[in-house]
Image: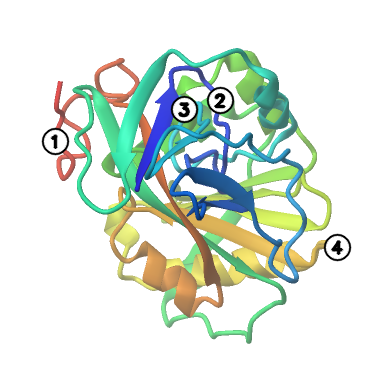
Amino acid sequence: MRLLVEGGLHRSGMVCRAGHTQHRRGQCQMRQDGEAHHQETEQPAGRPATPWPPPSTYALGPGVCHCVVIFRTRSCHDRGDDPDFRASRDLPSMTQSLSITLTGTTDLPPGKIATIVTSLEMFAHPPQRPDPAGTERFSLELMRHSEIERYLTVYRLLGERWMWFSRLTKPRAELEAIFTDPAITVYAVRFEGRDVGLLELDFRVSGEGELAFFGLDEPVVGKGAGRWLMNRALALAWTKPISRFWVHTCTLDHPAALGFYQRSGFTVFKRGVEVDDDPRLTGKLRRDSVEHHPIIA
C-alpha cells in the first residue's frame, strides 16, 4: 500500500502530539474490492476523544490511500492540539504532494527533513524515584513573562543539537501569547549560577498536562540532572487537576530520550512520520548545527 501525502501550508491535517503527519484516530485499510479507504477506529480506553472530523474516503485505485495531510513548519517538539491548530482544519487546499510507501523507503525532495515521532502518556503519578546523589546543586527558577529573550537563548542552547526550531519560527506575537498564557509554565534549570536546562509544562487542554519541552545542556548530562528534572516535572504536573500527562520524542532527539521517558513511567501509544522544511536552509538554525543529520539541499 502507498500513502499519498499532500503538503505545503503551515498547519497539519492529521495529528499526533505535535501536529505530525499521522492518523490520530483512524487507519488506512483495504476494502474487499481492493480499493483503499480511511476507516475510523475506536478511541482507546482512558484517552480523551480527539475533536477531529473523520477524513473523507478516497478511491484512487488498488493499494493507494489518499489521506489529506498539511505539513506544519514546526518541529516535533511543538504541540498540535492548541486552539489555533484545531482551526487549521478549515484551511484551503495543499500545494505539494508526496507519495509515501508503507512497505519500503521513500525519497524526500531536497531541502526536507523527516523524523519518526513517538508519543507517550501516563494516567497517574508513577512511583517516586530518588534524586541522584549530587543533584542538590541544581534548582528550578520560574521564568517571568517578560523573559522571552532569556527563554529563546536557553531554547537555542539546548535545541540546536537536536533540531529544535518550532519556537524560533513563530511570529513574536504568537510566542508572547504562549509565554504569557497562565496555563503554561516555563522553568529554567540553574546550575553553578547559569541556565543549563528548560522545563515547559502545558495545561491548556482541560484534564491533561503536556511535557512540552524538557532539555539539559550537554555539560550537565550524566550528572543525574535528567532524573532530578523529571522528578520535578512529574511532581509539578500531578499537582494539577489532570488525569493524563503526555510527551513525545522523535528520532532527531537525543537517542536515549525514548528509553528515559519509558523508565520514567510513560507508555508509548502512537507513532508517526513528520516531514518539514530544513530550518538550516531558512536561516532559523545555523547551517553547521545538527551534524548527525546532514543537510541535503
Residue receiving disc 2: 11
- In the rendered image, is residue 58 in sight? yes
Q: Quadrant of residue 216?
A: bottom left
Residue 71: which disc?
3
Closest to the camera, between mark 3 and mark 4, is: 3
Q: Nearer the viewer, residue 167 or 104?
A: 104
Residue receiving disc 1: 294
Q: CA distance from mark 4 to mark 1?
A: 43 Å
Residue 245 on image: x %, y %: 67, 63
Q: Earlier in the sequence, mark 4 or mark 2?
A: 2
Q: Earlier in the sequence, mark 4 or mark 1?
A: 4
What amino acid does circle 2 point to? Arg
Farthest residue to the front: give it.
33
Q: Residues within 10 Å of mark 4 (few under 14, many from 20)?
A: few
Judge left or right: residue 217 versus residue 17.
Answer: left
Q: Earlier in the sequence, mark 1 or mark 2?
A: 2
Judge left or right: residue 30 versus residue 171.
Answer: left
What amino acid does circle 1 point to? Pro
Residue 2 on image: x %, y %: 34, 42
Residue 126 on image: x %, y %: 64, 81
Q: Nearer the viewer, residue 43 or 71?
A: 43
Q: CA distance from mark 1 to mark 3?
A: 21 Å
Q: Quadrant of the C terminus?
A: top left
Residue receiving disc 4: 241
